[in-house]
Structure formats: C-alpha cells, structure tokens
Image (tube, rainbow, N blue to C red):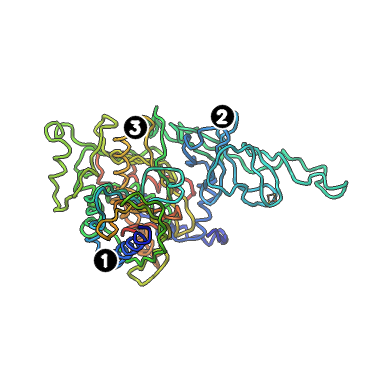
Amino acid sequence: MNKIVLPPEDARPLNWPEGLTRVPYWVFQDQSVYAEEQRKIFQGPNWHYLALEVELAEPGDFLTTHIGDTPVIVTRDTDNEIYAFENRCAHRGALICLENRGKHRKDFSCVYHAWNYDPQGNLTGVAFKDGIKGKGGMPDSFKMEQHGPRKLRIAIVHGLIFGSFSEDVPSIEEYLGEEILNRIERVLGGRKAVVLGRFTQALPNNWKLYMENVKDSYHASILHLFFTTFELNRLSMKGGIIVDESGGHHVSYSAIDPEAAKDVDYAKQQLRSESEYKLADPTLLESFDEYHDGCTLQILSVFPTFVLQQIQNAIAVRQIVPRAVDRTDLNWTYLGFADDTPEQRLTRIKQGNLVGPAGYISMEDGCVGGFVQRGIAGASEDQAVLEMGGAEANSSESRVTEASVRGFWKAYRANMGI
Amino acid sequence: MYGNSLQYITKAQADYARCIDDDRLEEWPSLFHGPCLYKITTASNYRDGLEAGIVFANSRGMLTDRVSALREANIYERQSYRHILGLPSILSEDGAKVKSETPFMVARILQDGDTSIYATGRYFDVYEIVDGAAQLNERTVVCDSSRIDTLLALPL
Ligand code: FES
Ligand SMILES: [Fe+2]
C-alpha cells in the first residue's frame, strides 16, 4: 500500500479514445494514473464526503478518515463548528491521531515529539521549543503560526460533512446542482440521522470499477435476482436516471406504479415473481412508506467517491477510499432516524441484509469488480464498450442506459485533463 | 450443572462448525431452536451498542433464506470455510439457559486453492440445555476486525 513511484510524465499511456463510449483498461491498472488521481481528483477541486454531522454531535467529538490516500482529522470545536485538517504532523509527518473516533478532545498531541494542535488544526505547542537551560531549541525565526497541517474547506449538506483541500472548489450548492441537492434532501432533509452500524468492505479492485457499478443501472436487474424477483427494481418499473451537467453526479431511481399499487398491495406483488425463488420469511422485504412518492429505490452518487443509498427503508452512506490500484475500501454507514418507531428500526435492520459484504444484492456487486479487475489483466491496450442508451451522458427516463457511467468518465477526464 | 453445560456446549459448537465446513448448509437453520437470533457484527459496533448487523436474522425462515439464496439466487465464487474454535467460556447460567462466549478463527478456501484467514472473533451464544444437549437459541458473531472482505457468503 502507498508504494507510489511516479514515472516520468511521458511514460503514461494517455491514448484515450474519442467520445465517451470507450474506456481504456489501463485506467484501472496503471500506477502513475493512480498517483495522478490523488493529485488531480482527491487533492483537486472536488468535495469529498468526510462524516455525518451526527457523528460529531458535541464539541470535543472527533474522528479520522481519508480523502484518497490522505489521512484527515475531523473535529467539532467548542465554537460548535466543524473543522478538518490533514492527519499529518507538521514536524516530521507522523500521524497526529491514531484513533478512529472519540470524545472530549481539547487538543491533539503527536506521539513522536509532542507537537500539539488545537481542534482547528493550529500548531499550539512545540516541545522544548526554547531548548533546555538556554541550549538547543528552535531558532527565533520559527513561527508556530507558519506551521500546521493543511486545513480543509468544509461544507455541510443535510447532515453530510464534505471537505476539500482545494481553494478553487465551487460552493457545495454549485458543485452538486439543484437536482442532486433536492435528491439528497429527499432522503435526509430535516431529519436527525442515527448511526445503526458501520463497517468496511474490502474490494479487490480499482475504486473506479466500484463507482462504475454504482452508476450502472443496466446491470441492476440482470445481475441481482433479488431486485428482479421481488420487484424492488426492474427496468420496466417507472423511474429514471439523473446525470448532472458535469457528468460526475447521478441519481438512479425507480418507483412502483401507483395505478398498479392501488388494487394490488406490495406483498401480493412479491408473489408474482417470474423466478421460482421464494423467501421463507418475506418480512425481510416488508417496508413502510417513508417518502410518500412511491420511490422504492434511489441510488445517488457525488463525484468522485460518495454514495447515498435508499433501497426501500435501508438507508446508508458509502464512502469509497482507494487504497491501491487494485484495492479499495468501501466504508458503509447504515442509518436510521431519531423519530423511527421500534418497528421501523427493525425494518431497516432487516433490510440491511440486502447490502454490505453479505448483502443479497451487494455481495454480487462486491464480486463483479474483482471479476473485471482480473478479467482485464494483460489487456491494458484494450477498452470497455459503453454504448447502451447511446453515446451521451444525459438524464433519461430509461434505465437501460449507461449514461451515468459515461457521465462519470466525462467528469473524470475533465478532472484529469485527458 | 456447570461441568455438564460446558460439555454440551462444546459438542454443539463442534456440530455447528462441521455443519458449515462440510457444506451441509441446509442443516444449518435446524441448529437453532426456539426464538432464533443470528447476527454478524463487528467488535466496534458491538462495543458501541449499534444495532445493525452485516447479517441479521430473527427467524429460522431468514436463516433458510440465507441458504437458499446462496444455493439458488446469488452470484458469487464458490468457497469453503474451516472453523477453528477455541474453548467456550460460560458467562452465566440461569436454570436451563446458559450464555457462553467462544473464540473462533475461520479460514477461507477459494476455488483457486488460495487459503487465508478470513475472520477471527467471538460467538456470544444463548443456549438452552434440554435432555442433555445444548440447543442454540441465539448467536451473535462478533468479528474482531471492522474490515470484512468483499464477500461474506457462508455463515460464520
Ligand atoms: S513528527 Fe510529530 S512531533 Fe515530531
Ligand atoms: Fe449492483
């Protein structure tokens, strides 16, 4: 991990085919591409999901996370504001904070030489700064305010904390655009989220293969028997794809047909499956009407690595952290809301069986990324075909399209300058 | 009673491990008796009292569905486990109800022969001792690590 050697600029195989319908396989394989993504995407003018506001409910709460390879500390200070800064000591670069999360933190002290930082990431103390008995110590020219870890810009949207290293990133509202913002609001707006569980799923593939999968509405009802059989998501259902102007953010949604739902309730629909497969305990799929718009599924992604999921009442945020060219961490946080009844809470927890590394749906997504990574070995010169639904990256009512996958590559190439 | 419970639980643990490792998954739900709870979670979620599981089943039907999904519905690479179980500790005994904790290590063997340690952790179990046998009512599988490899297909 983190063994990144930068080859000379011209060693990169930057022969990207015309248009959005081809993706060269080297983009999932090349070490120098990975390194450049770190600079241009993860350090670049993008917003990156850091944490939920509710995870930092009180002053003194803190947690550590990553933006790409870069370790980050996120805090809530006594002024009740959220701050984030690089988890890298300004002295010799050691991690400042080793814990995943904690409370009541007034300062952060590096274990190596005890340089000390406040929760806003300012250097506030240097051990033996003035030496001992007039000998040693820092020169007068050393000013603490000139040293400190890099601070991030912070933006909060409906309880989601985003951070950016870039001074050039537009406001989060501008970055996301109205349609994406509305769709985040639909799931999280005006409610107090509660964390029901969190864990990391280790994926044996490049981070972009997972992002492609998230945006690939074409595969959903083919690969996932659960979706199709139980009509959680069928390509014939009402729904659509939203791709924002940049291409990088998307929403895929499907809805039960309110006309059909009028006389046949949802439980009965589950029996009309085309496959022979039946659940012994169908309460797994019992749901409650949470959003009053008939949408049984809404998968939303924010470029480059954030996903907000509503599958029935299973709500989760997913943070994708690249670890190496062929390794990715997927951080899941399962959510409920403070005003859930016990029955609603249980419904969410049961539906949690659909997602994550053991999820009836997600285990398959976890597999296919590895199948592609292994499948393209030795085929760096070859390329993927993305022609389903045309050649554009536009919103559509059809989900038989790879429009949002093409959108991802549009945004990716804009970021990477290729 | 104490000595006997330990013996009964040890036998139940051995039967459980063999059932999964021998790929007799169809029998796995029948190892649970009475009110059934099977949950896989992580040590940090367990410590923090977070409710959701990576797998959560509160009926035998849900266990049956896990198996039938693996057999009929889900797409994944075939694999097998080898459970190595440590000694059970009795945590409490209340009449026939016995709570225990047992450490485990599970190796995963993939199609290509690759064998690796897949998970380590503890079983927190609730047993009922009936007619000289420990019947499993509840099992909470607490994995030591929060990081789970992409595919958690078989039960732990
Ligand atoms: S590296 Fe942190 S104090 Fe020296
Ligand atoms: Fe999928």
Residue type pointed to by label 1: Asp
Q: Looking at the rendered structure, which numbered label has been put on residue A336?
A: none
Point out residue B104 in the picture as x, y percentages from the top left corner.
40, 61
Chain letter of disc 2 in the image: A
Residue receiving disc 3? A340
Please give the name of the residue rendered at 19% of the width and 43% of the height, measured from the top-left corner.
Answer: A236
Q: Secondary structure at mark 1?
A: loop
Residue type pointed to by label 2: Asn
Residue receiving disc 2? A80
Residue A377 placement: quadrant? bottom left
Residue receiving disc 1? B23
Number of marks in picture? 3
Point out residue A267 in the picture as x, y percentages from the top left corner.
16, 39
Point out residue A319 in the picture as x, y percentages from the top left corner.
44, 46
The answer to whether A57 appears left or right of B42 in the picture is right
Point out residue A69 in the picture as x, y percentages from the top left corner.
53, 52
Closer to the chain start, of discs 2 and 3, is: 2
Query: For mark 3, does the 10 Å Cα neighbourhood hold few (<14), some (14 to 19), or many (20 or more) residues?
Result: few
